Amino acid sequence: MKRREFLRNSAVAAGAMVFQSSPFTFAQGADARIEVLLDETLGEISPNIYGHFVENLSGVVYDGIWVGEKSKVPNINGIRKELIDEMRKIKPPIVRFPGGCFADSYDWRDGVGPEDKRPRRTNFWHGGEKPEAPDAHRYDPNRFGTNEFVQFCRLLSAEPYLAANLRSLPAEQLYRWFEYCNSPAGSTSLADDRAASGFKDPFKVRYWGIGNESWGCGGNFTAQEYAVEYRRFTAWVPSYPGMDRLAFIASGPNDDHWDWTRGFLEEIVKKGPREVMGIYGLALHYYAWNLSRGKTNDWVKGKGDAVNFDASDWYELLQQGDVMESLIKGHWQVMGEFDHEHHIKLVVDEWGPWYRDGSGLTPTNQLEQLPTLRDAVFSGLTLDTFNRHPEKVEIGCCAQLINCLNSLYLAHEDKFCVTPVGHTFALYGDHQGGQGLRTEFSSPTIHYDRDGKQASFWGLNGSASLHNREIVLTAVNPSLKDSVDAQIAIRGARVNSGSAVVLTAPDIHARNTFEQRQAIAPRSAKVQIKDGTLVFNFPAASVAKLNLQLA
Ligand code: AHR
């Protein structure tokens, strides 16, 4: 559809709900309107929703992060330097490690102490490794353990978030891991062991996941069984100075499994309503994987391709991403049935698209996929969704940081690139710690062909936050054809000046590779004031960030 026809259609059909949300009269020439309501704050946007996930899975740790001190790849104490340099630009607040499913097979003791004494163990993911994959992917050398992970976090100024093994280790080992990480210098034998490795002062790890996907790889529990285990693992844990309230994150549901959320909390409160106060967060995992357009629910057959996709696949993936909003609202509502004051927050510690195998730059990296512009738009849409629910979502971890699913970075030996997803994180980082603001987007609905039937998707959506006298506004234009001229009204203030950054490309399959590291990169754009009105052009298939200075 041509832009002019589109405008005419919108005007004619306005009464027929062509606009997504309504109350505006559009000035001549505008396609859409954004209204930021300064006096309707939603709560502080937790910096931690911009977090990351690192699992000891194939090329994520070994090659991706850890190259070793003696490597010719520039490194800081064995950690890939280019990764540190790039991550510092996006202010990573928190990193989750060591899994994922790996966590429930991991013995933390294997990864501490003198390097040459650390055992090699069969990695949880060994069965999926190709014969030509490096040994370290199949048999964990334990070279990157708790010390190295904490050091990685310190280099990034990020909080460590450790996921504990509830399936195959006793609760005692969780206490010992706390003790190793948090007991004061000289206080316990494990503090001495830590000091002997060069870390005299406690690591002060606050965030602890109590198992992972305990309904599946984390133990195959029922929600009720898991609740009992959760209570046992977290009861009477040792506390240390400055670390007396640890943040325990319970293993939560996968997508819309309300029964898990309900069953878990129902069992928890059987011991009394105050039991909810010991739970900091409930993990929610959501992967957008089914691109079959309703044809199958088969985990293998339903997946789409990361790089070869058509217009319908583009919109289908975004539709799937948009489900996140209903999951947040739905689980929050169920949580409220048992936790009336909402002490427990949502921790979306695994999210992203999951495609069929085969697109990765390093073919031996299990689960590695090559992110395109579509994944950048998906990621912007997801981060906007988190921003719109600051009272509910406390932590978010994109799965996974490097050489895996929705990765921000890809690396192999001395080769490295930032993916379009990495660029989206760079744009959105400015929201961290801001006051979320209610923001209304009104735009023409997009229609597309879904196997001969018409399907629709919203035309523009996003989020805004306030930081002193600056508004950060991010938005996604999912349309493959039309750019959107939007009027932006800030209710309750005037804008002095503004700047913008846009991520888009002429080809929706655009991606960065080791050879073409800059095939897709953000560029700055102009925010205009026309006749006293703020106007911005959101290009088709784009993610954009505006920084608006208030008078
Ligand atoms: O991110 C890959 C895997 O997906 C994780 O190990 C697991 O938690 C999830 O099922």
Image (spheres, helix red, strand yellow):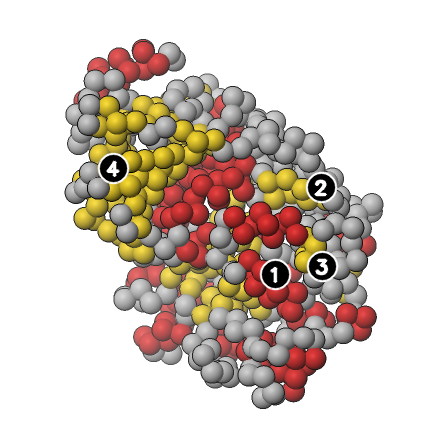
Kindly indicate the quadrant of the structure image that contains residue 193: bottom right
Report the residue at 42% width, 39% height from top. 381
Q: Is residue 40 left or right of residue 220?
A: left
Mark 3 beta carbon near ligand 1 (under 8 Å): no
Q: Quadrant of the C terminus?
A: top left
What's the mark number on residue 78?
A: 3
Q: Please, is residue 279 above or below residue 240 in the view?
A: above
Q: Give the foreground label among 2 and 4.
A: 4
Q: Amino acid at mark 4?
A: Asn
What numbered label is drawn on residue 496?
Answer: 4
The CA span between labels 3 and 4 is 47 Å
Is residue 405 something one can see in this rendering?
Answer: no
Question: Mark 3 vs mark 4: which is more N-terminal?
Answer: 3
Say few, some or many: other residues with alpha carbon within 10 Å of mark 4 (under 14 / 14 to 19 / 20 or more).
Answer: few
Q: Amino acid at mark 1?
A: Phe
Q: Residue at x 79, y 66 (%)?
A: 120
Name the residue carrying label 2.
415
Q: Which residue is mark 1?
A: 152
Residue at left offset 53%, top offset 33%: 521
Q: Nearer the viewer, residue 482 or 269?
A: 482
Q: Earlier in the sequence, mark 3 or mark 1?
A: 3
SS at mark 1 in the image? helix
